[in-house]
């Protein structure tokens, strides 16, 4: 009897395997084809934008522009470290590396160096190891820790300082924010830095103070929706604005791109899915799931609904890939395959010549920048499809 039941159960399960995922495979195959066609057009566009000196930045643009293109090209699988375009691009990028390891020009040491590290690691080439190691050490030196060189009293900083564990634009004397943080943590993760490194452990403090979760966050503006704001420093700031509750207390509005950045960064920093902070962020994401706008931004100003939209797409894709759940259930109980949704949306916004272009705010009027963001979003979604083939 047991053997008969086992055989019957095996038959039912095998039938379910062949019947249920069939449409899933068809949808995934169609989506993958659409994604690849979009990437091929984008690759041709970016290749046409390479400057005679090997870089992709123009005029006063930062070297991170070249790094973003290099990373996008390498992640496509159509280029490697030996490709002439790539070699020439890295020669230009590394011409900006300083003696202390930073890769930037004049300003934005954190952003530029972090993005450069992700490009260098995407090359998977030993020839760039020394440059990468120097850049990693420089990036780690910019983190707000309990002491800063050059300040009075040995530079000791009180643990209550909301900047602790974060990264600012360059020197640690400026306030830290979630965008610099997520770039830095992704770079350190991609470099292979171990999760028990103090840089990741310290980052947990800053991440906790970015989140609207009064259970764990001690900042005065904190709400309880589980989403993230831009910075807890200088009394806190959100790109989605602020509001007051029924008691008149000032609160900061959570929004999409920073909440996805927070989720991804918490995982990089070693927090598990069972952690209340991670669970709260995931609940906010499920409740506010959309690929049509950067959620939260529209509540402050309808014109802001598309502000940072392509940054949102790239951050969203990376975060959901890292989180590892192909299917997301929204507040109404509807299930979404985020990979399919995102690829269809982003590919549908592509211009005929292969580029994307957004609003001027946050530099998204720059077609090279938005094309990189869009490519990386699609590449993350395709990588997740490959890892969870048929995973409905």
Image (tube, helix red, strand yellow):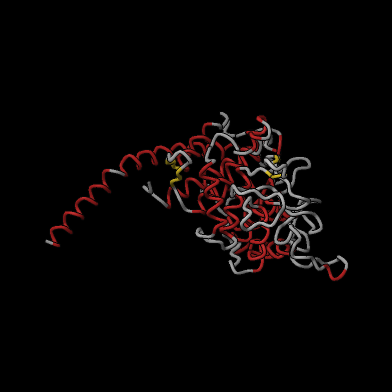
Residue drawn at the location 67% of the way across and 33% of the way down: 304
| Quadrant of the frame with the N terminus | bottom left
Front residue of 27/52: it is 27
The x and y percentages for residue 209 are: 67, 56
Residue drawn at the location 67% of the way across and 53% of the way down: 210
Position above or below: 301 against 139: above
Position above or below: 20 against 169: above
Spot the residue most to the left. 1
Front residue of 198/208: it is 208
- How many numbered marks are there? 0
The x and y percentages for residue 156 are: 81, 68
- Residue 116 in view here: no
Front residue of 87/108: it is 108
Spot the residue most to the front. 247
Q: Quadrant of residue 135?
A: bottom right
The x and y percentages for residue 69 are: 63, 46
Q: Quadrant of residue 60?
A: top right
Q: Is residue 365 left or right of residue 33?
A: right
């Amino acid at each position: 009897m047991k053997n008969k039941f086992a055989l019957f159960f095996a038959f039912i399960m095998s039938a379910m395997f062949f019947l249920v995922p069939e449409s899933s495979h068809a949808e995934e195959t169609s989506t993958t084809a659409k994604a690849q066609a979009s990437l091929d057009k984008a690759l041709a566009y970016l290749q046409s934008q390479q400057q005679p000196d090997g870089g992709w930045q123009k005029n006063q643009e930062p070297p991170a522009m070249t790094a973003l293109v290099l990373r996008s090209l390498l992640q496509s699988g159509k280029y490697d470290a030996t490709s002439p375009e790539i070699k020439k691009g890295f020669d230009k990028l590394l011409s900006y590396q300083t003696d202390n390891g930073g890769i930037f020009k004049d300003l934005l040491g954190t952003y530029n160096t972090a993005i450069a590290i992700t490009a260098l690691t995407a090359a998977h080439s030993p020839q760039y190891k020394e440059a990468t190691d120097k850049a990693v050490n420089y990036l780690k030196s910019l983190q707000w820790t309990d002491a800063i060189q050059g300040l009075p009293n040995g530079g000791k900083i009180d643990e209550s300082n909301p900047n602790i564990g974060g990264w600012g634009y360059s020197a640690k004397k400026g306030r830290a924010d979630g965008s610099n943080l997520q770039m830095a943590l992704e770079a350190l993760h991609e470099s292979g830095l171990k999760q028990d490194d103090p840089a990741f452990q310290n980052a947990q403090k800053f991440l906790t103070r970015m989140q609207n979760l009064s259970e764990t966050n001690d900042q005065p503006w904190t709400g309880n929706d589980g989403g993230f704001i831009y910075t807890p420093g200088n009394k806190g700031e959100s790109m989605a604005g602020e509001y007051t509750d029924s008691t008149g207390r000032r609160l900061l509005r959570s929004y999409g791109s920073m909440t996805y950045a927070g989720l991804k960064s918490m995982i990089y920093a070693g927090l598990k899915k069972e952690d209340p902070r991670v669970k709260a962020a995931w609940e906010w994401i499920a409740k506010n799931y959309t690929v049509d706008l950067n959620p939260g931004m529209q509540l402050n100003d309808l014109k802001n609904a598309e502000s940072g939209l392509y940054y949102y797409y790239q951050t969203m894709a990376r975060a959901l890939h890292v989180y590892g759940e192909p299917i997301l259930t929204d507040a109404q109980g509807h299930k979404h395959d985020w990979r399919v949704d995102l690829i269809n949306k982003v590919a549908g916004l592509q211009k005929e010549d292969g580029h994307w272009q957004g609003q001027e705010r946050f530099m998204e009027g720059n077609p090279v920048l938005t094309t990189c963001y869009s490519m990386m979003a699609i590449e993350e979604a395709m990588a997740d499809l490959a890892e969870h083939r048929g995973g409905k």
